[in-house]
Each structure stands twice: as C-alpha cells, then as structure tokens.
Image (cartoon, rainbow, N blue to C red):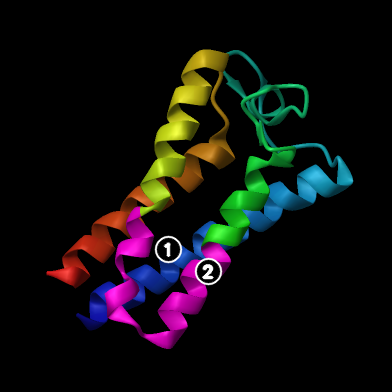
C-alpha cells in the first residue's frame, strides 16, 4: 500500500506541474515548447479560437489544475472514502481524446495529462480494493 501511495503522490505532482505549465502558457500567451507541424501541434489543440479547448469560457488547463489541486487536498487528508474522486479524471481523459480526434492534432502536454489521469484512476482503483 505504501508503494501505491508514493506512486499516487508522484502522479499528482506530475499532473500538477503539467497543468501549471499549461495554465502559464494560457495566461502569458507564452510559446509552447512543442512541435507545431504535422499531427503533433500543441498550439492548434490549445488555441483559444478552438471550441474544444475552452468550456464555459474557461481554458481546459484551468479545469485540470483545479482537479489536481482538489486531488492533492484529498490525498493530504488521507480520506480513502473520497478515492472515487480520482476516477472522475477519466471524464477529462475521454473529452481530451475525443477533442484531439476531432481536431486531428495531438498535444504532448495534454497527452501527458491524459496518461497521468489514467494512471491515477488505476492506482485509486487498486487502493480501494
């Protein structure tokens, strides 16, 4: 169980760092450290003009950061009954994959978040059992 707890902590740190980077890109219109040609095009996926990158006027990166902050709080309190919260991240993964499929481009940073959220859900599942 201790190894799963440490793995969950590492995944939360990774997801938070990735989300902070994406939020800083949104806030400061900073250039992305990512390819902008071919199928991998972070700028196109994260473009504020793309209807799939914003929900209710808020860029998706802000939702991701909020999710990771809430998750870190749950983790810090040690409330195992709230572990199903981690499974809600899969909704974001599904949305992200569908959006990138429609846009026909991939964002590496979004894909890292997706993989992190899937891993968190898997760890949370094993911790519940």
Residue 57 appears in which quarter of the rendering? top right
Report the residue marked by disc 1: 11
Please determine whether, in this image, residue 6 is positioned above or below residue 102.
below
Report the residue marked by disc 2: 70
Residue 92 location, x and y as percent? 46, 42
Circle number at residue 120: none
**Highlighted range, magenta:** 68-87
User: As drawn, is 124 to the left or to the right of 69?
Assistant: left
Q: Can residue 73 be found in the magenta stretch?
A: yes
Residue 7 location, x and y as percent? 33, 70
Q: Secondary structure at mark 2?
A: helix
Residue 54 location, x and y as percent? 68, 34
Residue 1 location, x and y as percent? 19, 80
User: As drawn, is 36 to the left or to the right of 105?
Assistant: right
The residue lying at 44 percent from left, 76 percent from top is 74
Q: Secondary structure at mark 1?
A: helix
Q: CA distance from mark 2 to mark 1?
A: 14 Å
**Frontmost residue, 7 versus 78:** 78
**Frontmost residue, 40 versus 89:** 89
Q: Quadrant of the C terminus?
A: bottom left
User: As drawn, is 128 to the left or to the right of 59?
Assistant: left
Q: Can residue 104 be seen at all in this image of the molecule?
A: no
Callout in the foreground (2, 1): 2
Q: Main secondary structure of the magenta part?
A: helix
Q: Can residue 6 be found in the magenta stretch?
A: no
Is mark 2 in CB contact (under 8 Å) with mark 1?
Answer: no
């Amino acid at each position: 169980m201790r190894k799963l707890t440490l793995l969950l902590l590492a995944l939360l740190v990774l997801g938070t760092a990735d989300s902070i980077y994406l939020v800083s890109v949104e806030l400061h219109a900073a250039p992305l450290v990512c390819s902008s040609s071919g199928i991998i095009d972070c700028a196109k996926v994260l473009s504020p003009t793309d209807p799939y990158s914003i929900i209710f006027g808020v860029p998706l990166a802000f939702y991701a950061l909020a999710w990771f902050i809430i998750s870190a709080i749950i983790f810090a309190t040690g409330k195992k009954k709230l572990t199903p919260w981690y499974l809600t991240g899969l909704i974001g993964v599904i949305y992200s994959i569908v959006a990138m499929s429609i846009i026909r481009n991939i964002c590496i940073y979004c894909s890292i978040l997706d993989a992190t959220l899937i891993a968190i859900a898997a760890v949370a599942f094993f911790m519940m059992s």
